[in-house]
Amino acid sequence: MKMTKVGTVYQLSFMPRVFPVNCYFVEEENSLTLIDAALPYSTKSIINAARIIGKPITRLIVTHAHDDHVGALDGLKALIPDLQVSISFRDALLLAGDSTLLQNETNSPIRGGVPKNIQTQPDLLLKEGDLIGSLEVIFSPGHTPGSISLLDTRNHSLIVGDALQTRGGTAVSGMIKPLFPFPAFATWNKLIALESAKKLRSYKPSLLAVGHGKMLEHPGNFIDRAIVEAELKLQPENRRLK
């Protein structure tokens, strides 16, 4: 595991040179908020990283319920029984193993590794605008129907799960980057993902932290180019739907 710090954000990256899977600590005055839970074997490394920082993990926020973002969830909850676990009201269904679409959702299958054996139940179901410590919840669906992003209101650091990637090049969820195509294959709805990327850009983030790839400081131009690329690639699909 590799740990990198930018401001209030610590990136914990597993297999960073081969298949980077990231989770994050956001540092509060007396505690740490963990965003996502990486892979099943990540539990010990996450706990050790918190010890190095010297603050307890009190909250865990899941950006979306794919296997590589909830892998260590049960292990962490077993070691930290008071850990407050939260996820969007929509992706709580995925966390429970239910990939059924809701009546108002676009009829495209939910893709990616939907967990089947997670025992931990969330303590909080999140919605747009909720505040968890210093973090504001931004509803950013597309990769999954209930994906969320977290904005640090102190400095505009933005943790987006898989709404964007930087591995292989900055891309909106659903856009294939040949050097790292996997997040695209696991995306539920590319058009909705594009709208979410535009929404996230409007927050003018100072730091972009993603599920797969390095963090980017001053990421505005990178996000802008990724949005333009997605718009061009999705033009035929947009025309078909009109």
Image (spheres, helix red, strand yellow):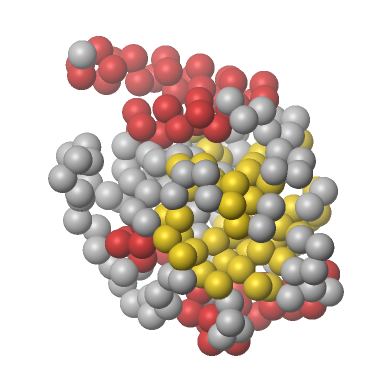
Q: Is residue 203 above or below residue 238?
A: below
Q: Residue at x 66, y 64 (%)?
A: 33
Residue 110, horizontal then vertical, whole percent? 27, 49
How many labels, in total? 0
Residue 64 visible in this rendered orientation of the protein: no
The one nearer the camera, 159 or 137, is 137
In the image: residue 135, left or right of residue 97: right
Is the N terminus in the top left, top right, bottom left or bottom right quadrant? Answer: bottom right
The one nearer the camera, 131 or 201, is 131
Quarter of image, res 83: bottom right
Q: Residue at x 58, y 20 (%)?
A: 225
Residue 208 visible in this rendered orientation of the protein: yes
The one nearer the camera, 184 or 83, is 83
Residue 187, horizontal then vertical, whole percent? 36, 43
Q: Is residue 198 above or below residue 68?
A: above
Residue 139, horizontal then vertical, whole percent? 45, 42
Q: Is residue 53 above or below residue 215?
A: below
